[in-house]
Image: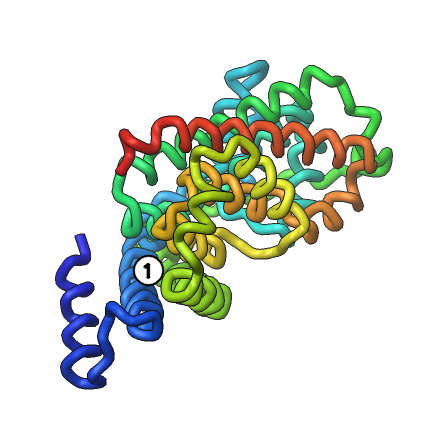
């Protein structure tokens, strides 16, 4: 898809700067420039398209839609809505309170909270540009599956008493849902592109920078040996190592791309990415305001196990994806 860009950067480095892309320095610089431009192009396109779709699903409407569903269908709908609904760690508490106040089951609420940070238009855009539609599509499907399964299990555990008591006493009242026309939706999408890129550009450059160093300098043989698809513990270690970290999909995907190019298993790299985005420490701190430690522990354990299984799935079918 971006062969033209790859060739352009190569010509620039070799002809203008006399820097061979076969060298460690040249390879790293090529990765950084190429990935930065490629990701910004894909991000702008995908954020615009998904933001236009998102304009039909403000949080208030999402809550009202979920009120109509129960059982497993509620978990599925919550995970699907998590793909197209704005979410970040800072919004986890008000969203959680709003869902519980509306009578949405705890398990359904967690299906949304799990899927929404994992699957987003930015991560999809980068995966599509870096690995193609097969991996990007499977990433979306497995992200939804993690949310559905995680929410179902949490619902089966009947842990409503692990929610702080004051949450059930809050009455948020009815919210006005503004209906937008086509021009307003277009303006919303354009503004969202500007806002998101402005907010994440530093994470993006840091992630690409780390990925560039890995791409140019990390020993392929060592990474392939200890973190390749044949190491049965690699996925588990990646998930456990990712849980305490804080980043978003934009900062972790360039790192995942560089690791995969060096021989690390696809599932191992993507499981690390999912663990960082879905189970970040700041989000757990914020959720502690509304749920008790036992439920937080259950949430992290269940989602972590689901992500590990996804990692092994990706590693198992890697030969069909690349």
Q: The residue tagged with tag 1: helix, strand or loop?
A: helix
Q: Nearer the viewer, residue 195 or 288?
A: 288
Residue 321 picture quarter:
top left
Q: Which residue is mark 1?
A: 39
Q: Nearer the viewer, residue 225 or 53?
A: 225
Is residue 208 visible from the viewing direction of this image?
A: no
Residue 320 picture quarter:
top left
x and y percent of residue 302 in the render? 65, 28
Residue 205 relative to residue 305: left or right = left
x and y percent of residue 303 in the render? 61, 32
Mark count? 1
x and y percent of residue 46 in the render? 31, 51
In the current view of this chain or complex, which residue is farthest to the right?
A: 165
Q: Residues within 10 Å of mark 1 (few under 14, many from 20)?
A: many
In the rendered view of the protein, which quadrant contains the C terminus? Answer: top left
x and y percent of residue 126 in the render? 35, 52
- Compared to 41, does 170 lie above or below? above
Q: Residue sitting at 51 percent across and 43 percent down?
A: 226
Q: Residue sitting at 43 percent across and 35 percent down?
A: 229
Residue 312 relative to residue 48: left or right = right
- Compared to 36, does 243 lie above or below? above
């Amino acid at each position: 898809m971006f062969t033209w860009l790859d060739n352009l950067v190569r010509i620039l480095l070799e002809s203008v700067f006399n820097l061979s892309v076969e060298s460690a320095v040249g390879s790293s610089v090529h990765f950084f420039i190429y990935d930065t431009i490629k990701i910004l192009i894909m991000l702008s396109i995908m954020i615009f398209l998904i933001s236009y779709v998102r304009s039909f699903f403000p949080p208030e409407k999402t809550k009202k839609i979920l009120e109509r569903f129960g059982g497993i269908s509620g978990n599925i709908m919550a995970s699907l809505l998590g793909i197209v609904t704005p979410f970040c760690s800072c919004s986890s508490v008000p969203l959680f309170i709003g869902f519980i106040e509306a009578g949405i089951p705890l398990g359904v609420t967690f299906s949304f909270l799990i899927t929404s940070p994992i699957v987003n238009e930015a991560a999809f855009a980068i995966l599509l540009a870096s690995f193609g539609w097969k991996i990007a599509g499977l990433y979306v499907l497995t992200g939804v599956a993690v949310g559905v399964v995680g929410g179902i299990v949490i619902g089966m555990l009947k842990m409503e008493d692990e929610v702080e008591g004051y949450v059930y006493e809050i009455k948020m009242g009815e919210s006005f849902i503004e209906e937008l026309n086509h021009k307003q939706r277009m303006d919303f999408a354009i503004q969202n592109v500007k806002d998101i890129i402005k907010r994440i550009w530093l994470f993006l450059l840091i992630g690409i920078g780390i990925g560039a160093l890995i791409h140019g300098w990390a020993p392929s043989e060592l990474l392939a040996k200890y973190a390749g698809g044949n190491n049965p513990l690699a996925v588990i270690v990646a998930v456990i190592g990712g849980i305490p970290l804080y980043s978003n999909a934009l900062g972790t995907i360039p790192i995942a791309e560089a690791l995969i190019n060096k021989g690390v298993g696809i599932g191992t790299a993507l499981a690390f990415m999912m663990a960082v985005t879905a189970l970040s420490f700041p989000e757990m701190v914020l959720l502690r305001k509304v749920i008790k430690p036992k439920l937080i522990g259950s949430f992290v354990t269940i989602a972590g196990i689901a992500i590990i299984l996804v990692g092994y799935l990706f590693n198992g079918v890697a030969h069909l994806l690349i």
